Amino acid sequence: MSAMHTRAGEALCDGETIRAGGCDIRVIATPGHTADSACFVVEERSHGGGAVLTGDTLLGTGSTVIDETDGSLSEYLRSLALLEREGHRMVLPGHGPLTLDVADLAASQIRHRMARLAEMEQALCELGLPAQTDTATIELVASRLYGDLVHARRGAVLMMTAAYLKHLKAQGLLSARA
């Protein structure tokens, strides 16, 4: 994990357990939103439940934006799969209301992202666009998929469109249209 994640001057490690305030807190590296995203599982020993502090990795409502500087949709999808395996634990997000089941919320976000990827591929086919992540392509595809939201939330919409296009290109799914 990034050197930005520290405890008493030492970097936190994925899978590390921190004991603090009578709690066991397990660190989970969840890159995707940003390269250094992390979640924390607060273990509840007596009942086997606990909660997951998800920060911006999973929100109480809406979708996480993939940061254009160091975020990655591919890594975000892997992180969602990790969180899905945490089972039925409460989600304490950085934004929005708590949710009662991290597995359900993560699975819902995976389905949402996969549906959006399919829509993105369809839009590229319909627009006859080549496999590019240039500004013009990003703006055309964003307008096609997000409509008026492009104007209301321009920065976030363009970042997400770029993240989807980069993911599709990295997966080799756009090369046939080049």
Image (cartoon, rainbow, N blue to C red):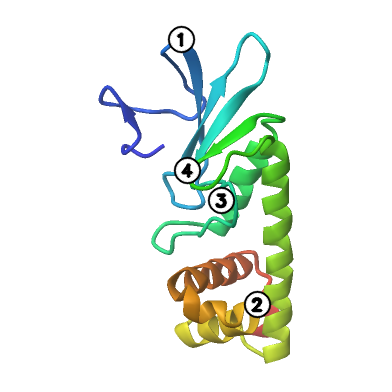
Q: Quadrant of residue 13?
A: top left
Q: Earlier in the sequence, mark 4 or mark 3?
A: 3
How much space separates mark 2 and mark 3, taking CA atoms? 21 Å
Badges 1 and 2: C-beta atoms under 8 Å apart?
A: no
**Residue identified by numbered label 1:** 22
How much space separates mark 2 and mark 4, taking CA atoms? 37 Å
How much space separates mark 4 and mark 3, taking CA atoms? 19 Å
Left or right side of 58 for 102: right
Q: Quadrant of residue 11?
A: top left
How much space separates mark 1 and mark 2, taking CA atoms? 53 Å
Whether residue 19 is situated above or below residue 117 in the rendered picture: above
At mark 3, the secondary structure is helix
**Residue identified by numbered label 2:** 175
In the image, which is nearer the foreground, mark 4 or mark 3? 4
| Amino acid marked by disc 3 | Glu
Which mark, by number, is residue 85? none
Q: Position of residue 148 (x, y in %)?
A: 57, 82
**Residue identified by numbered label 3:** 75
